[in-house]
Amino acid sequence: MILQIDSPGRCRYLWQGLASLVVLQLLTSFSVGYAQETFVRQRETNSHYSEGDWVSYSVARFATSIAIGRQYIYFGTQHAGITRFHRYRESWDFPWTTSNGLTDNSVSVVAFDEDTDTIWCATRHAISYYQPSARKWRNLFKEDFGLSRDDEIESIGIDADGILLVSNAGRVYECSKFGGTILEARDINGNRNSRIRWFGRRAPAPKEFPHFFMSDGYLFNPDGIVEDAHFRRAKVVSAVEDDWGNMWIATRGFGAGKADTRSLRLDMLEFGLRNFSVDAMTFSPDVLWLGGSTISELSQGITAWNREREQWQFFEQKYVTELRSDQVNEITSDGNALWFSTAYGLSYYTNETAEWTTFTHFDGLADNVVHDVAVDDSSIWVATDNGISRIIRANLAHKDSAKIEPLNPDNLALVEVRDLELVENLLWAATSNGVYVYDIHTKVGGFSNEIEGPFSLSINSISRYENEIWFGSDNGIDVFDTDKREWLGVPAGRALQNTVVNKVVAAGEAVWAATNNGVRKYDRDSNSWRKFTIEDGLISNRIYSILLDGDFIWFGADNGVTRFYWNVPSRID
């Protein structure tokens, strides 16, 4: 087929698209190992919290199945649990994940029982069901009914008599429509008296698709292939028609779509993150920006989520000329613009013009690897793998005339600077060689060497609240009081020893620390630390970033992001 194409250029693109499809199908047929799999061995939803207290989002574009409910269209996904599209509001609601009671976020099939309004699903570790009246998930683990760990339920059947479960290996199980014990069945039909409605692999599929028309650069092939503007292809793995003339589709690569079977228009319904890893987050102003430093062929790019308009936008380095890297270490808001600290330079994005500009070592930065920036009225202070650089703001309008100078190159040479905090005239830096302080007025700086300071020289994060400077290191938390000019002791300081703290954020009521084993919260009223893990609702225990949002707080992890409604007056954590 390729040899018959007249245009060599078009031939090349078609081959790239085919290669992308092959890679997409090969990689998504396995459990993708970009991030640690979250598995919570819980029988039901954590009753300490209300529904919606914990909400998690991940990469949702690898869909597996569809179920049409009364208010929602449910999509099973390979990494993001069950996503839910509201039929009447025509917008996405928060997904159901391990944060809401599922045992893991890899859903092979989702089903809806019209008799009881119960939602059923199969994950890697369990069969789960949700009863709307209780607003709670309950889990029946594979070992409870004798299903091998290597075998998965691929189809769920529902009829008037109960629930049928069929595995990849052909084993058949049955249970009551209200849950309870799962038993092995003789066969699929047995003595059943009513028609079985199937979901998943056994669900009826269209014999052929209409020739749908698409926008936003998408093309639809009636063979069941969706292609985007970059010649990437994704296969339709499930398609279901509702009573309103809509066809809902699930793809492995582009997520969910909605087609009007009368006008033959198909729209993809963007939802979820572009990258599993969330190392950086910020608001600007109504848009939540998220980026990660760990990327792969199927997990890369920057996500911009306008929550008010429910719009998702993505930026990938290979398709944005001036964006040199989408491996993001930090995102910093600067008025109506954003700074992206990346693995290859410092990128500047303006909301008004939607234009990107990138500064690299070639332009004068001390190093191409940038970890963070701090901004003031006159300067942009840049933390790199080789010290700190200063960009003069007055010359920023034109990249060619931008003035960039190193800060104290003698004592910061080859020092990895990971985080910056500007407090009046003092620039505090978290480095691989300890705490560094620089006076931007006198242009004098040096490393802190007080014996009462951090035990570890490997400092990862800095956060300031009023007269307190908090430090997160490879050996816990330390606090410096700028008024008293002394390091604080336990329980606030000298805390979490032998714990790697990736990020610390200090606020009025509490101080939050992101670690490789959950989140720690220091409550100022009780003067004590509290630990949150996946058992509470985190999408993962490996947390990289934290973003305050009033009564809510966001935690960026290695496999997604979690929002926690932490300031609930009626709940005691």
Image (cartoon, grey):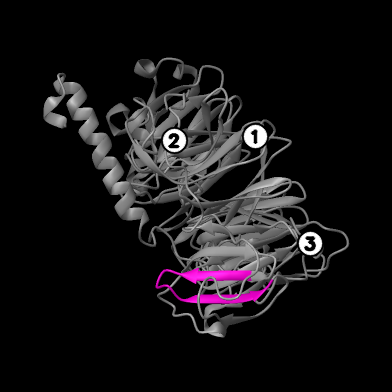
Q: Quadrant of residue 232?
A: top left
The rendered magenta stretch, by its main secondary structure, is classed as strand
Label 2 neighbourhood size at 10 Å, few (<14), some (14-19), many (20+)?
A: some
From the top left corner, tell me how far across and down residue 285 is, in percent: 65, 31
Mark 2 — residue? 209
> Which numbered disc, 1 or 3, marks the residue that appears first in the sequence?
3
- Whether the residues at callouts 1 and 2 have beta carbons within 8 Å, the answer is no
Residue interval drawn in magenta: 163-176
Mark 1 — residue? 310
- The image quadrant where one finds the C terminus is bottom right
What residue lies at 52% left-to-right and 73% top-to-bottom?
125
From the top left corner, tell me how far across and down residue 363 is, in percent: 31, 27
- SS for callout 3: loop
- SS for callout 2: loop
**Mark 2–mark 3 distance (CA, rounded to whole Å):** 42 Å
Which residue is more in the foreground, 277 or 443?
277
Label 1 neighbourhood size at 10 Å, few (<14), some (14-19), many (20+)?
A: few
Observer able to see residue 455: no
What residue lies at 27% left-to-right and 29% top-to-bottom?
362
Residue 449 drawn above or below residue 554: below
Q: Amino acid at mark 2?
A: Phe
**Mark 1–mark 2 distance (CA, rounded to whole Å):** 29 Å
- Determine if the magenta segment contains residue 166: yes
- SS for callout 1: loop
Residue 307 drawn above or below residue 24: above
> Which numbered disc, 1 or 2, marks the residue that appears first in the sequence?
2
Q: Amino acid at mark 3?
A: Ser
Mark 2 vs mark 3: in front:
2
Mark 3 — residue? 50
> Which numbered disc, 2 or 3, marks the residue that appears first in the sequence?
3
**Mark 1–mark 3 distance (CA, rounded to whole Å):** 23 Å
Q: Amino acid at mark 1?
A: Glu
